[in-house]
Image: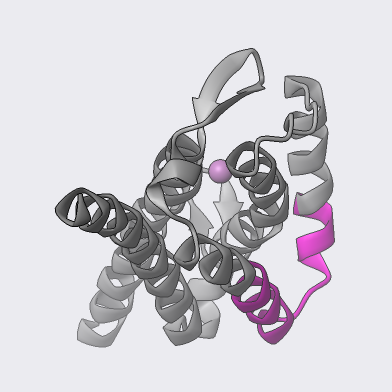
Amino acid sequence: MRTGKNLVDARAKQIAEQFTHAHGELLSIAERCSGAEWRAYSAAEGWRVETTVHHVAADYPALFEVLQAISTGVPPPSVTREQLDQRNARHAQQSAGLTKQETLVLLRRNGGAITDFIRRLNSQQLDPTGQVLGQNVSGAHVIETWMIGHIQNHLTSIRATIERIEVDENVDRAC
Ligand code: NI
């Protein structure tokens, strides 16, 4: 039975590492952004890179609440699609007044809290499900799709935006 438990723990450990990696990548790209990159508009979101990074950071606590509830067998907080849309609109305004440092502090703090929590989870806590937005989702789904998948989607567009800026800057230098 020892082998079984080790397998189970390996799965929890792997999910924790995947989150830590995705969050760490976003953090390090955000930290390295130049002023021009930070303010550049990303085509995928129609937001500046700074707003997109803030969006992921600001989204963490609600997802964390859902994960904590599901993994401890408590019904997750009820949330509607309209509430999510309103929150996204509000956050776009909030982020406009923040410095890069303030946004990075938020990203580190909110992501760090989730990292600490996920690292202590075992596989039994990843499998229970709860109802969120009319779907029956497990803790593993919240982490893999709603947290890691969400980070990766925005990372893809942030990377594309930064590459575009670098191309533009090289063209400027060539001229
Ligand atoms: Ni998003």
Q: Quadrant of ligand 1?
A: top right
Q: Is residue 19 above or below residue 141?
A: below
Residue 110 can be seen in this image: yes
- Principal secondary structure, stretch drawn in magenta: helix
**Quadrant of res 98:** bottom right
- Count all numbered tags in the image, as a single digit: 0
Residue reaching furthest front? 1
Q: Is residue 84 left or right of residue 70?
A: right
Residue drawn at the location 74% of the way across and 41% of the way down: 88
Q: Is residue 39 left or right of residue 80?
A: left
| The residue stretch that appears in magenta | 92-110
Residue drawn at the location 70% of the way across and 73% of the way down: 106
Q: Relative to the observer, which residue lies in front, 119 or 96?
A: 119
Residue drawn at the location 73% of the way across and 32% of the way down: 76
Residue reaching furthest left? 3
Q: Is residue 175 above or below residue 7?
A: below
Where is residue 37? Give x, y as percent. 47, 74
Residue reaching furthest top? 134
Residue 44 can be seen in this image: no
Residue drawn at the location 51% of the way across and 77% of the way down: 36
Where is residue 158? Give x, y as percent. 41, 60
Q: Is residue 109 magenta?
A: yes
Q: Is residue 106 magenta?
A: yes
Q: Is residue 115 above or below residue 80?
A: below
In which quadrant of the rendered image does the C terminus lie?
Answer: bottom left
Where is residue 48? Give x, y as percent. 59, 59
